[in-house]
Amino acid sequence: MTTSQLVFIGIKGSVIALHAQTGQQAWGVHLSGANFVNVQVQDGKIIAACNGEIFCLEAATGRILWQNGLKGFGFGLATLAVEPNCGSAAQAALAEKVFFPRGPVVFSPPTAPLGRGVPTSLRD
């Protein structure tokens, strides 16, 4: 299974993978605590931050490959930054596979103050 076939959710100290076509859960793994989980995808791996720790998961299975407790930095929220590795064609292909109850969500060109697109549905 590839990352383009899954949607990754961070919630209550856990990461969950859902099948992009059906929304059915593929796997779930509890990482730490019961707080917010920041999730990024890069090169077939999931990088997740929660409860002051960073984890690297195998995207296909959720198996924890490594973790770092970030000793000495406390338990606050951590922001993740990874280098983008897919072009707009790959992102568009994934957007077509993700199920939204009212259709895919797109952002119109900004008409509000700079940087604030207006969410719309393709079915509206």
Image (cartoon, grey):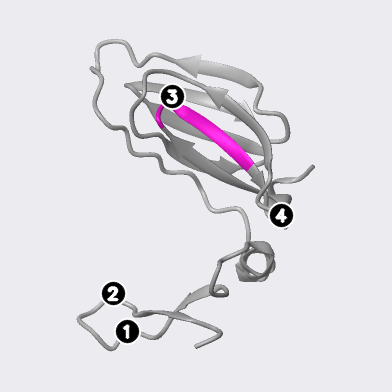
Q: Distance between the residues labelled 3 and 4?
A: 29 Å
Kind of element beneath mark 4: loop
Asked whether the beta carbons under mark 3 and mark 1 sit within 8 Å of each other, the answer is no
Mark 2 Cα shell of 10 Å, populated few (<14), some (14-19), many (≥20)? few
Q: Between disc 4 and disc 1, whose residue precedes?
A: 4
Which amino acid does the dot numbered 2 rest on?
Gly
* Nearest the eye: 70 or 30: 30
Main SS, magenta residues? strand
Tell me the number on the disc at residue 22: 4
Q: Which of marks 4 and 1 is in front?
A: 4
Q: Quadrant of the N terminus?
A: top right
Q: Is residue 34 left or right of residue 101?
A: left
* Above/below status of 77 relative to 63: below
Question: Which residue is drawn at the image coordinates 31% and 10% (left, top)?
Answer: 71
Tell me the number on the disc at residue 110: 1
Q: Between disc 3 and disc 1, whose residue precedes?
A: 3
User: Which residues are drawn in magenta?
Assistant: 12-17
Q: Distance between the residues labelled 4 and 1?
A: 32 Å
Which amino acid does the dot numbered 3 rest on?
Ile
Spot the residue most to the front.
101
Kind of element beneath mark 1: loop
Question: Which residue is drawn at the image coordinates 39% and 13% (left, top)?
Answer: 69
Q: In this view, does 41 lie to the left or right of 48?
A: right
Tell me the number on the disc at residue 54: 3
Question: Which residue is drawn at the image coordinates 65% and 51% (left, top)?
Answer: 23
Q: Between disc 2 and disc 1, whose residue precedes?
A: 1
Give the residue at mark 2.
115
Q: Which of marks 2 and 4 is in front?
A: 4
Which amino acid does the dot numbered 4 rest on?
Thr
Q: How far apart are marks 2 and 4 (CA)?
A: 32 Å
